[in-house]
Image (cartoon, rainbow, N blue to C red):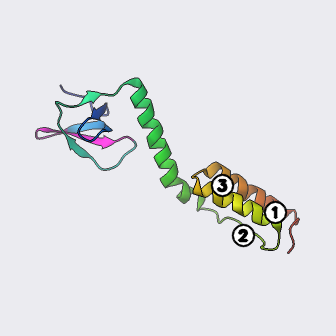
Amino acid sequence: MQHEPGTLLYDPATDRFGEYQDRSGPYAMLRPVGGGREWQADPTALRPATERERLRAGVRAANERARTDGPFMLGLRRPPEPVPDCPECVELATRRAEARAAYDYSAETDADVLLRGHQRERNCPA
């Protein structure tokens, strides 16, 4: 069966979904959703992904991008340093560290914004 480039297919040999790229000799070339290194697959074993599988693969790729791209995007601006003797600064810095460890970049950014606002209002000891 001939597939159109970009068609999402399931490869049972690797238990992965990939976007069909082209043929290379007897093999079909698949690339992970969202990009990455291509792999060779037996074209007779491939099957089209269901709608649910396409959605799941897209969400998985988006989550992977958030884990890999997020730290670089957030690194454009240096996070504020907490004042060690200020309990609120320490609490907000702890919240930021926990969010980063959980790959919750939205909560990490929220903690940075709150810490900057707290320090700007000079509510912490200098």
* Residue beneath disc 1: 88
Label 3 near label 2: C-beta < 8 Å? Answer: no
Give the mark nearer the N terminus: 2 vs 1. 2
Label 1 near label 3: C-beta < 8 Å? Answer: no
Give the residue type at disc 1. Glu
Q: Considering only vertical position in the picture, is 113 above or below 43?
A: below
C-alpha distance separating marks 2 and 3: 14 Å
Give the residue type at disc 3. Glu
- The crowding category of the residue bearing disc 1, from other C-alpha atoms within 10 Å (few below 14, some 14 to 19, many at least 20), is some
Marking on residue 108: 3
Q: Position of residue 39 (x, y in %)?
A: 24, 46
- Does the magenta run of residues contain 73? no
Tally the marks: 3
Please report the residue visible at 75 percent of the width from the left and 60 percent of the height from the top.
Answer: 92
Q: Which residues are magenta?
A: 23-33
Please report the residue visible at 42 percent of the width from the left and 26 percent of the height from the top.
Answer: 52
* Residue beneath disc 2: 81
Q: Main secondary structure of the magenta part?
A: strand
